[in-house]
Amino acid sequence: MNGNARSAKRGDPWFPDGNIVLLSEDSSVAFKVHRDFLSRHSEVFKTMFDVPQPPAGTGESVETLDSCPVVRMFDLPVELGNLIKALYDATPLPTRGRNHLRNQAIRHLTQTWSNTLRGHDEMVELAVKSPIVDGKTYPYVHPLHVLNLARETNVQIIIPPALYFLSLYMLHDILAGDHPKLQINHPSCPSSQLSARDLQDYTLMFQHRVEVILDFIRRTCGDRIASPGCQNEGTCVKVFQRYGSRLSRSWKIRTGPLHYMVQVSDEIFENSEICGPCRRAFRQDAHARREEVWNSLPSVVGLTSWKELEARDL
């Protein structure tokens, strides 16, 4: 077990008349809920609760908390709480209950697998800062699972970010299926197999990602000319050429171009060999290129614009 259920704090919701306790992945938060209610309104919970408990006399004790059996989940506290509240909140709204619940679920997914560049940047920053949990890095789920979930539920808005992050993995690793994030055994877990359709989209995204990096290194860095307000044209151009040469030798096949552009831009902005106007112009161009790459991401795999995807799914 990951921890003692009795040390977990009460989460929201916690129903005094509940008859089952759901414990978050890290064992830090518990939610007391109604077993029959969740089974009725969620196939995932119904399947989970249908798993037989150890019979009496087998020596295997059933974990309990507040006189209720405990079910350990693979969800973080905030995610689990949002899911439970979404199920309960949707029920009194018969005319829009199902759509309301679906909309809440999609919006929750896009908090991590964002449809905006700002959301993407926040996710990457959080991934860099967050600790490793059970051998897994943030966001603790494999993008292949997110992609398959999107396909199963016909949610297109999370397909581009899922494919973008999936393209950071090598194909032989994806096909092997032995990544720790793909080893989760849970009724709610989507398929760990890459479909033939998504093999094509993965390849398109992988190729696009590499082309974006090479184009950025060559055109935005190496072939750069001095800005109109350059204070030292000869020096600035030579420094940019050196950057292009160095970056062309040092980039990695698993590099994410959107974050890579930020790193290069920050490094150049701190380089005193380049004059202020040229540094500012480079940062503006790098920012514009990132926006361009992000806006074109859905079209790489044949989807409509972000705006149209948002109107469709949200």
Image: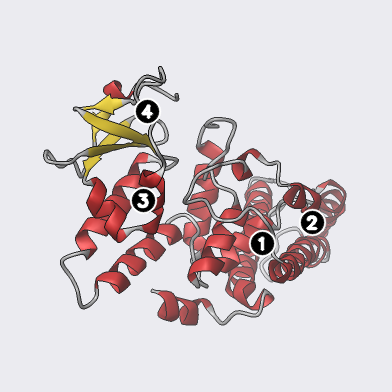
Q: Is residue 302 visible?
A: yes
Q: Earlier in the sequence, mark 3 or mark 2?
A: 3
| Percent x, y of residue 23 | 34, 35
| Percent x, y of residue 207 | 79, 66
Q: Nearer the viewer, residue 92 or 156?
A: 92
Residue matched to label 1:
282
Foreground mark, 2 or 4, reads 4
Q: Is residue 303 above or below residue 128?
A: below
Q: Is residue 277 visible?
A: no
* Amino acid type at mark 1: Phe
Q: Earlier in the sequence, mark 2 or mark 1?
A: 2
Distance from Cα at disc 3 to Cα at disc 1: 52 Å
Q: Is residue 67 above or below residue 128?
A: above
Quadrant where the image shows the C terminus = bottom left
Residue matched to label 4:
55
| Percent x, y of residue 163 | 64, 62
Tell whether label 4 touches label 2 (CB within 8 Å).
no
Residue matched to label 2:
240
Q: Image quadrant of residue 230?
A: bottom right
Tell whether label 2 touches label 3 (CB within 8 Å).
no
* Amino acid type at mark 3: Phe
